[in-house]
Image: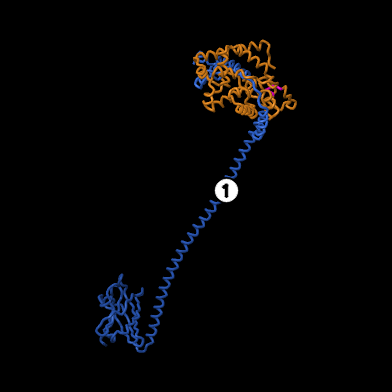
């Protein structure tokens, strides 16, 4: 924009008689043109004097009282010079920040304490859980041991009862002995069967029995009258010996006429002997009968 | 956009307690304030005293220019109550922010009256166009306002010589030029509005304003150099 474009508006601009668009156009030029700016300054000085030509009226005395009374309310807003106000404001801001910082720090400490407490509780809970698991395992182990002990105790009771029965049988003067001799399947085997009529208990004592296969037991059979009945199953010990206590049912009719031992499958029917005969009465006894 | 700091122009020098103004006077607010003769003190010195919350300094400045500020406001808004409110605002603003006075802009009184005028224009504009429509620029209205009786008394005497100078200069202007300038300055009208109100071409109004202010400037210089001096 050239100086000629704004030249005729400089005075009007100084007078404030331009609209906004024109005013901005002139201001844009004055910012970069020192000559036109000097013209504006001269016009402005003249314009500023115009106020002195205003028709003069005397203001009400109350106006002075209002003004002088009004400044009292502003005393509180300015505590001191600018630099003091700045320092005061800075101090106030610093105090506020410090209060926030202290509050935040306290909060952080409280939170940290809470977190530590929670971690401690959690640790205790984990320990209790682990302890509980260990105790549960120990309890199960104890129950298992107790169960095993009960079984063992029951077996011992049975063994003691058997031993007691055998002692009773051994001192019975009316014992009826029967010797069994191993067949060709177990030629080294020998068994002795005694029967106490007073006690109604019989006992089979064996030695030299060969070890059986898996799921195979020795089975003692007795023939009473015209029936052959299973008397009992047994397994040999490691040294080939074995004992079997025999209690016939009270309603079993008639005296025993024959005894023999077979090898039977554990799950096989016990109604009739199906396996091979391993032990049978010796030929001498058979001849005596 | 402010033109206070154009490229290549002198820097603004504010009157602050720790500054030195362009006339080289010591700027300490506390400097001999106890011995300040308020009635004889220059305006700049009193403004300096305002920085230390000197109520007597404000009272002195009001006694000197209160009627002028009030008259400018009354002339522009045409309402006594509103003019008083605006006058109070101007002096309270001076009390709160005396550092806003820019020495490089000229004398204190012209700055103070320009503040009063600008505040009055703002008030008129904030009240919308209705205000302006109720008082359209007219030759009769402007002549009536400009011929209002002046106040008597001693309070305004401090500027009486300058008033004489500007009044004489205005009287020498052609009537149309004086009217256009008064409508723009005291009425707050733009050139377009004046042209519309006076039923004159815009170019004519522009020329009247431009030539009128240029002539007024020369007349002021001549009359000052002719022997009428301000205190």
Q: How many marks?
A: 1
Q: Give residue B130's position: percent from left, percent from top.
A: 52, 26
Check the image and report above or below for A208 versus A30: below
Label 1 crowd bin: few (<14), some (14–19), many (20+), radius 10 Å:
few
Q: Residue at 51% across / 22% down in the picture?
A: A20
Residue A28 in sight here:
no
> The chain shown in blue is which?
A
Check the image and report above or below for A144 versus B138: below
Label 1 element class? helix
Q: Give residue A274's position: percent from left, percent from top.
A: 25, 75
Q: Residue at 52% across / 27% down in the picture?
A: B128
> The chain shown in orange is which?
B
Query: Is residue A83 on the magenta stretch?
Result: no
Residue B141 in sight here:
yes
State left or right for residue A186 relative to residue A118.
left
Residue furthest right as drawn: B35
Q: Give residue A98's position: percent from left, percent from top.
A: 61, 41
Q: Locate the C terminus of chain A by quadrant.
A: bottom left
User: Is B188 in front, or is B35?
Assistant: B188
Q: Which residue is mark 1?
A: A109
User: Is A127 in front, or is B217?
Assistant: B217
State left or right for residue A231 relative to residue A12.
left
State left or right for residue B128 relative to residue A225.
right
Q: Give residue A77's position: percent from left, percent from top.
A: 64, 34
Check the image and report above or below for A152 versus B163: below
The residues colored magenta run B41-45
Residue furthest bottom as drawn: A173
User: Is A148 in front, or is A191?
Assistant: A148
Q: Main secondary structure of the magenta part?
A: helix
């Amino acid at each position: 924009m050239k100086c000629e474009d704004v030249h005729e508006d400089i005075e009007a601009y100084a007078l404030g008689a331009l609209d906004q668009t024109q005013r901005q156009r002139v201001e844009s030029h004055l910012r970069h043109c020192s000559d036109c700016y000097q013209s504006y300054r001269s016009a402005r000085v003249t314009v500023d004097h115009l106020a002195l030509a205003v028709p003069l009226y005397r203001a009400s005395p109350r106006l002075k009282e209002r003004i002088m009374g009004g400044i009292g309310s502003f005393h509180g807003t300015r505590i001191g010079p600018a630099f003091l106000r700045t320092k005061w404001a800075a101090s106030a801001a610093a105090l506020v920040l410090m209060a926030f910082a202290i509050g935040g720090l306290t909060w952080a400490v409280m939170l940290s304490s809470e977190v530590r407490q929670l971690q401690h509780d959690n640790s205790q809970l984990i320990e209790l859980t682990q302890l509980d698991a260990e105790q549960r395992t120990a309890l199960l182990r104890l129950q298992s041991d107790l169960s095993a002990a009960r079984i063992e105790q029951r077996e011992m009771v049975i063994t003691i009862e058997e031993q007691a029965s055998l002692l009773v049988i051994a001192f019975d003067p009316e014992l009826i002995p029967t010797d069994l001799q191993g067949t060709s399947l177990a030629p080294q085997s020998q068994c002795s069967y005694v029967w106490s009529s007073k006690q109604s208990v019989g006992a089979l004592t064996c030695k030299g029995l060969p070890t059986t296969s898996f799921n195979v037991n020795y089975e003692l059979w007795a023939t009473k009258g015209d029936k052959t009945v299973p008397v009992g199953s047994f397994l040999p010990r490691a040294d080939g010996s074995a004992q079997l206590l025999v209690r016939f049912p009270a309603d079993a009719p008639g005296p025993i006429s024959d005894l023999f031992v077979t090898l039977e499958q554990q799950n096989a029917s016990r109604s009739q002997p199906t396996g091979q005969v391993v032990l049978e009465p010796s030929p001498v006894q058979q001849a005596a009968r | 956009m402010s033109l206070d700091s154009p490229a290549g122009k002198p820097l603004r020098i504010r009157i602050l307690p720790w500054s030195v103004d362009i006339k080289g006077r010591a700027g300490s607010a506390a400097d001999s304030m106890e011995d300040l003769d308020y009635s004889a003190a220059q305006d700049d010195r009193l403004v300096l005293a305002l920085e230390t919350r000197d109520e007597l300094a404000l009272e002195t400045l009001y006694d000197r220019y209160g009627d002028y500020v009030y008259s400018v406001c009354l002339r522009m808004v045409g309402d006594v109550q509103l003019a008083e409110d605006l006058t109070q605002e101007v002096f309270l603003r001076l009390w709160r922010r005396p550092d806003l006075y820019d020495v490089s802009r000229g004398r204190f009184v012209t700055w103070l009256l320009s503040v009063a005028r600008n505040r009055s224009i703002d008030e008129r504009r904030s009240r919308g166009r209705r205000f302006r429509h109720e008082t359209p620029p007219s030759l009769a209205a402007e002549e009536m306002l400009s011929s209002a009786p002046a106040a008597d008394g001693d309070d305004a005497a401090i500027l009486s010589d300058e008033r004489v100078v500007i009044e004489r200069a205005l009287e020498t202007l052609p009537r149309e030029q004086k009217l256009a300038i008064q409508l723009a300055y005291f009425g707050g009208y733009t050139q377009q509005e004046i042209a519309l109100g006076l039923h004159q071409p815009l170019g004519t109004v522009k020329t009247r304003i431009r030539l009128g202010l240029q002539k007024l400037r020369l007349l002021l210089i001549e009359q000052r150099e002719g022997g009428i001096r301000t205190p």
